[in-house]
Image: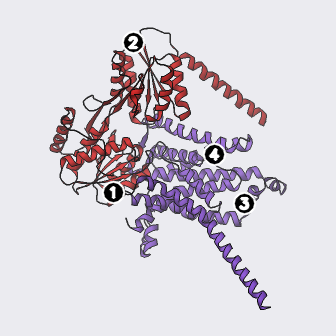
């Protein structure tokens, strides 16, 4: 009985393997020399967050609109898969390979060294010595600009004169957002204080909520969450306690329908598409690092669809946004304090 | 933040971990090192939100979470008891499956990705007890928690009684200490293992449900290592239910302390380390204390012997 069960399981496993191998073959397409073949390798699962969903949706649409482009989105979810999958893409004959985040930088560098003809791009690579690699282009989102606007909105909306910040981790990317936020508050210059906390997780709404409650108990009436899923907990705390929430990346109106002021939105899809567009139109800049911000349509501030922010404040905030897009405001990437 | 708030938050934090820890403790007691607590908890959390969403009732949601996590643990049990798969290997696959499945199913079930927030009517209700208000500090700390947190606080005592004083507890201990001897004593080992694992599944489901429904939302990976914390807590306590209660509360306290110390200028790296540093102290302190007591006793008896000798 036990043996039979084992046998059946083994056969099922073999069948699954066979099936996946067959389906893998199916996606290989015939080589047209005109066609640009692009691989997008994500280190996070595509359905794990909204920005990645938007990104894949955007890429798919771009692929449909442009006949000479073929885009394949691939997940590499563990460190040991990064280099293997990137190399597999090289072998498959992709002309442009886009990897994601500094996590994948080492794998990208290793693969790029062996395939000098392939153009590599890394999204949010944060690579320091990018100039050493002629076939890697780093492109990243400027988060300080929208965070600056969020800071302005928070300073204009607060009634207690004290606003809070909950970051997912005390790291480079989050601190850039913090830097923008603090300078935005300073720009309004109405004596608003800010309190900085880090909840050390991007997926824990329970702990995020506790951090927000702590800030609210300390007198903050605007909470800015830059902590992914933990931020959902902050939004919920703000909604329950009747204070305001300032969102990041996407809208949090599912958790804070009446409390969200607005969100420092990111449009990663526009950035990746802009990069692909540049590259296939012979405007590839390997060995450089490029920043995309409000002016390039990769970021923007959006007010939530509720009546929280009065029209005059909205106008004031959007005026700041226009100034930033026009390059009239200089924003540093170092936080004023932690 | 004052100490009463810190302790209240600590109890709230410890609740789900405690439920899961007690489940893992039972599994450990029948000699199954259940590394997959995290996975079962995540399944419980997700399913409870699905259940609450479809039935519109919190408690049916809890039931749904419990059922799903129990179902999952039965699969796990079949693999390790019938097919003799290494429990740790099986646990890793369960964890992977749980994190992938919950992430994937968010889309077909709710049509969203990353997270789903229920309406606030489906939040786990908190119980307010008027008579507790009369007790100065402890009353405040223990008041206004959800029913499952109270259940979690009582559970270690129930388990301590069951394990030490009942026939079933004796069977569990026998299986855990020496399986072959248990077989020869006429204990139905397989049945005991299955039942212990099923209780483990139920408790993981409850822990997950408490975690998810108290914030009435599911977020990908929202258990955030609580299953491992539970495992660490019972390992520290040597699988003793009452000591596990203390270690779980200690972990809750550490988390809560970190929250209350944040925002006043402490380095977040140091704060992030605090729970683990506390755990280390908790693990080492009893040993050190035991050694010290042993040393003092020996010295004392030596001096007594010497003085006795000279007196004679």
**For marks 1 and 2 on the same chain, the one whose residue lies earlier in the sequence:** 2
Q: Is residue B43 found left or right of B290 in the rendered image?
A: left
Q: Nearer the viewer, residue A165 or B161?
A: A165
Element carrying mark 3: helix
Q: Is residue B281 found left or right of A274 in the rendered image?
A: right
Could you confirm whether marks 2 and 4 are on the same chain?
no
- Which residue reaches farthest bottom? B311
- Which residue is label 3 attached to? B168
Q: Nearer the viewer, residue A169 or A137?
A: A137
Could you confirm whether marks 4 and 3 are on the same chain?
yes
The percent coordinates of residue A28 (x first, y second) are 52, 15
In the image, which lettered chain appears purple?
B
- Which residue reaches farthest left? A312
Q: Nearer the viewer, mark 2 or mark 4?
A: 2
The percent coordinates of residue A111 (x first, y second) are 50, 24
Local packing at callout 3 (Cα closer than 10 Å; few below 14, some 14-19, many 20+) is: some
- Which residue is label 1 attached to? A215
Q: Chain of mark 4?
A: B
Element carrying mark 2: loop
- Which residue is label 4 attached to? B73
Q: Is residue A232 found left or right of B165 in the rendered image?
A: left
Distance CA(mark 3)–CA(mark 1):
48 Å
In the image, which lettered chain appears red?
A
Q: Nearer the viewer, mark 1 or mark 4?
A: 1
Q: Nearer the viewer, mark 2 or mark 3?
A: 2
Q: Nearer the viewer, residue B130 or A253?
A: A253
Residue appearing at x 49%, y 19% in the figure: A115
- Which residue is label 2 attached to? A68
């Amino acid at each position: 009985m036990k043996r039979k069960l084992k046998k059946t399981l083994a056969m099922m496993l073999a069948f699954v393997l066979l099936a996946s191998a067959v389906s893998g073959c199916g996606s290989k397409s015939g080589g047209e020399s005109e066609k640009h073949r692009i691989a997008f390798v994500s280190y996070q699962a595509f359905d794990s967050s909204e920005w990645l969903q938007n990104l894949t949706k955007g890429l798919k649409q771009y692929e449909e609109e442009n006949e000479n482009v073929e885009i394949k989105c691939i997940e590499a979810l563990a460190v040991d898969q990064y280099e293997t999958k990137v190399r597999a893409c090289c072998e498959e004959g992709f002309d442009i390979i886009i990897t994601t985040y500094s996590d994948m930088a080492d794998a990208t560098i290793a693969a790029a060294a062996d395939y000098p003809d392939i153009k590599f791009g890394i999204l949010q690579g944060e690579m320091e010595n990018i100039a050493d690699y002629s076939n890697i282009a780093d492109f990243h989102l400027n988060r300080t600009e929208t965070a600056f606007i969020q800071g302005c909105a928070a300073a204009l909306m607060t009634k207690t004169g004290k606003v809070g910040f909950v970051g997912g981790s005390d790291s480079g990317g989050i601190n850039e957002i913090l830097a923008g936020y603090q300078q935005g508050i300073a720009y309004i210059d109405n004596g608003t204080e800010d309190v900085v906390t880090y909840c050390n997780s991007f997926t824990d709404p329970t702990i995020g909520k506790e951090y927000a409650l702590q800030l609210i108990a300390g007198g903050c009436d605007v909470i800015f969450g830059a902590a992914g899923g933990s931020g959902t907990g902050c939004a919920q705390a703000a909604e329950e306690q009747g204070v305001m929430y300032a969102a990041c990346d996407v809208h949090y109106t599912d958790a804070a329908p009446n409390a969200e002021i607005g969100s420092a939105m990111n449009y990663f899809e526009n950035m990746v598409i802009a990069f692909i567009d540049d590259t296939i139109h012979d405007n590839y800049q390997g060995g450089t690092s490029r920043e995309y911000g409000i002016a390039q349509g990769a970021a923007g501030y959006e007010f939530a669809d509720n009546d929280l922010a009065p029209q005059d404040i909205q106008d004031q905030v959007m005026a700041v946004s226009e100034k930033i897009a026009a390059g009239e405001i200089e924003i540093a990437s170092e936080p004023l304090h932690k | 933040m004052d100490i009463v708030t810190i302790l209240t938050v600590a109890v709230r934090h410890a609740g789900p971990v405690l439920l899961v820890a007690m489940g893992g403790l039972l599994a450990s007691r029948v000699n199954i090192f259940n590394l997959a607590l995290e996975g079962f908890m995540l399944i419980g959390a997700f399913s409870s939100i699905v259940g609450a969403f479809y039935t519109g009732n919190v408690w049916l949601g809890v039931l749904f979470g419990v059922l799903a996590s129990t179902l999952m643990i039965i699969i796990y049990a079949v693999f390790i008891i019938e097919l003799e798969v290494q429990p740790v290997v099986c646990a890793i696959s369960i964890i992977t499956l749980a994190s992938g499945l919950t992430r994937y199913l968010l889309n077909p079930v709710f049509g969203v990705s990353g997270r789903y927030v229920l309406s606030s009517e489906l939040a786990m209700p908190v119980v307010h007890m008027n008579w507790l208000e009369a007790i100065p500090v402890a009353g405040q700390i223990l008041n206004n928690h959800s029913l499952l947190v109270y259940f979690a606080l009582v559970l270690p005592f129930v388990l301590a009684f069951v394990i030490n004083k009942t026939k079933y507890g004796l069977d569990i201990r026998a299986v855990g200490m020496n399986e072959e001897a248990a077989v020869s004593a006429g204990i139905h080992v397989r049945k005991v293992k299955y039942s212990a694992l099923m209780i483990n599944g139920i408790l993981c489901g409850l822990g997950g449900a408490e975690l998810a429904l108290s914030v009435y939302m599911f977020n990908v990976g929202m258990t955030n290592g609580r299953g491992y914390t539970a495992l660490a807590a019972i390992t520290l306590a040597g699988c003793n239910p009452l000591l596990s209660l203390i270690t779980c509360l200690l972990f809750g306290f550490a988390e809560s302390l970190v929250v209350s110390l944040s925002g006043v200028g402490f380095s977040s790296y140091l704060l992030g380390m605090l729970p683990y540093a506390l755990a280390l102290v908790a693990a080492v302190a009893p040993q050190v204390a035991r050694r010290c007591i042993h040393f003092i006793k020996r010295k004392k008896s030596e001096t007594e012997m010497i003085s006795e000798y000279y007196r004679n």
